[in-house]
Amino acid sequence: MSDYDRIADAIEFIASRARCQPALEEIAAHVHLSPFHFQRLFRRWAGISPKRFLQFLMLDYAKQALEESGNVLDATYAAGLSSPSRLHDLFVSVEAVTPGEFKKRGEGLRIGTVRRPPRGVPRTQYAAQNWYDVWLPDLAPSAGIIKLAQGATTERDWARFVKRYRAEMAAPEPSRLLALLAALSHQTNVSVGCYCADESRCHRSVLRALLTEHGARLA
């Protein structure tokens, strides 16, 4: 077997077992070389060490999971790591950013469309504590119709909330803000959120529809 074939075989072996994090000795044994000889040969052909190559693969799995779910724990397991702290170390080592910073980079400017800011959090700490970057209560439902959403138990109840909220957002000032966000979405990443975990029963789902109607580019 040529050196080229050995390294190609090793790369395939590492890629197929990346989540198990195979040790250098295991990979070297697979291609019938000593760990010392294999490490030197791999670096000569690939330009990086086997460990670094494995880290790149693990990071790719973690990034995909973060982009899909936004959940650090999901990303930790997707990369085959045992704890979020190890995921943090992986991101910092390879990308020089934390998982939270990577996630935020994809979100762009985070806009909080909530009636009230997080209780007990200073305004200067909204972004640092990962709430949002800008507070925009103008796009939040009024206190009266928030109760409609919270008390909705049937599709008919939810439809009543949607109708009332849409009516509020049709007023001149909210409508102009929606048009502005829609225009911004074509120039940069913007994310609109609140405190609800389930978007399907949150005003965010209606905002998404409204932004689409205003011509926004949505992910």
Image (tube, rainbow, N blue to C red):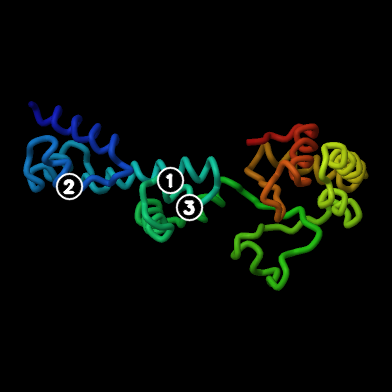
Horizontal and vertical percent position of residue 70 = 55, 47
Locate residue 84 relative to residue 15 in the image: left or right. Answer: right
Residue beneath disc 3 = 73
Residue at coordinates 63% horizontally, 43% vertically from top-left?
Answer: 189
Observer-side mark, 2 or 3, equals 3
Residue 62 marker:
1
Note whether 67 is above or below 141 in the view shown. above
Q: Earlier in the sequence, mark 1 or mark 2?
A: 2
Task: Give the quarter of the image for residue 172.
Answer: top right
C-alpha distance separating marks 3 and 1: 10 Å
Residue at coordinates 77% horizontally, 56% vertically from top-left?
Answer: 114
Q: Dot 3, crowdedness within 10 Å: few (<14), some or many (≥20)?
A: some
Horizontal and vertical percent position of residue 137 = 81, 56
Q: Residue furthest front?
A: 153
Q: Amino acid at mark 2?
A: Leu
Is 53 in front, or is 201? 201
Q: Amino acid at mark 3?
A: Leu
Residue beneath disc 2 = 24
Is 80 in front, or is 35? 80
C-alpha distance separating marks 1 and 2: 22 Å
Horizontal and vertical percent position of residue 64 = 47, 40
Q: Amino acid at mark 1?
A: Ala
Task: Give the quarter of the image for residue 182.
Answer: top right
> Considering the image in quadrants, where does the N terminus appear?
top left
Residue 11 visible in the picture: yes
